[in-house]
Amino acid sequence: MNLDQLRGFVEIARLGNFTQAADELHLAQPSLSRQIAVLERDLGAQLFHRARGGSTLTAAGESLLPLARRMLADAESVRRELAELAGLERGRVRLGATPTLCISLVAEVLRAFHAEHPGIHLHLSEQGSRRLLDELAAGELDLALITTTDASPAERFTVTPLLVEELVVISSAAEPPVTSGDAIALAEVARLPQILFSSTYDLRNATDAAFRSAGLVPDVALEGAEMDAVLRFVERGLGVAIVPAMVLIDRPGLRSVRLAEPRLERAISLARPADVAPAAAVQVMRRTITERAAVFAARSGATMRAAAPVA
């Protein structure tokens, strides 16, 4: 039994005539007759009383009709659901990102993606890069925006470089600038009151390492804060912080100055499992992330650039 046979059977039952049913189905009448004959043979029962004036259902046909209608309805439901998934009307994308990316690049990515595909359910995990890679390996995420300055992800991931951005020193726009020059040396930054991130942040590890390497001990005003809190504390004039350049976008309460050579940088990459074929919605999310990353690089000028692709 196949769907074409069931459609033919239901249409003949509705119209009571083989020829009219064949016309409705855009079939030759002999082809439809052969389909029904095969169906009757497979079922071992006659489905229609055939007469010159038309065709009526037998008792077996009466029993099959509601089942055939339900099977056709189920098949249409499956077809429609698959079409919705292919057309990005339904589905799910599980994205992970570091906290600094969540308040900058990811916010723009999700806005653009949701505007185009409002039926796709979005799940976001905000973690450090190492934790995000663990979640990706465990199958809990489809994509992860990570920083790859310190270590390369394992071979089980496919990693696409997106951006390289500088870390800059931020201070309150309501306070005098921390320097009169275009850049500030790390030794000068160490003498300013610092707002430090939580030790779980990749940024904290990077800045701590930079101070240690230079033999410097920073003047710590407050430590252990999350990204939103750090930015607010700096806006209120409690101290300075070293942050990625992109968090300055659309934040008029903050001013920034570049670090003098050697500058601190971080690389931003998009990781996904290497052994899993991405669903259609995930592929579109990847394109959206790549496009928005290019826009961010253009808006940030000298402090951010597109990453060179991996050879």
Image (cartoon, grey):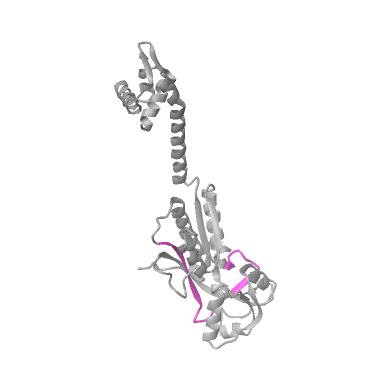
Q: Residue at x 57, y 86 (%)?
A: 187
Q: Is residue 246 above or below residue 53?
A: below
Residue that protrudes farthest toward the front in the picture: 44
* Residue 176 covered by magenta stretch: no
- Quadrant of image for the C terminus: bottom left
Q: Residue at x 55, y 74 (%)?
A: 203
The answer, for residue 94, to whether it is visible in the render is yes
**Location of residue 212 (image quadrant):** bottom right
Depth check, front residue: 239 or 144: 144
Q: Is residue 8 left or right of residue 142?
A: left
Magenta span covers which residues?
247-273
Q: Residue at x 53, y 82 (%)?
A: 210
Position in image of residue 266 (x %, y %): 49, 73
Position in image of residue 191 (x %, y %): 63, 85
Position in image of residue 12 (x %, y %): 40, 21
Position in image of residue 253 (x %, y %): 66, 68
- Quadrant of image for the N terminus: top left
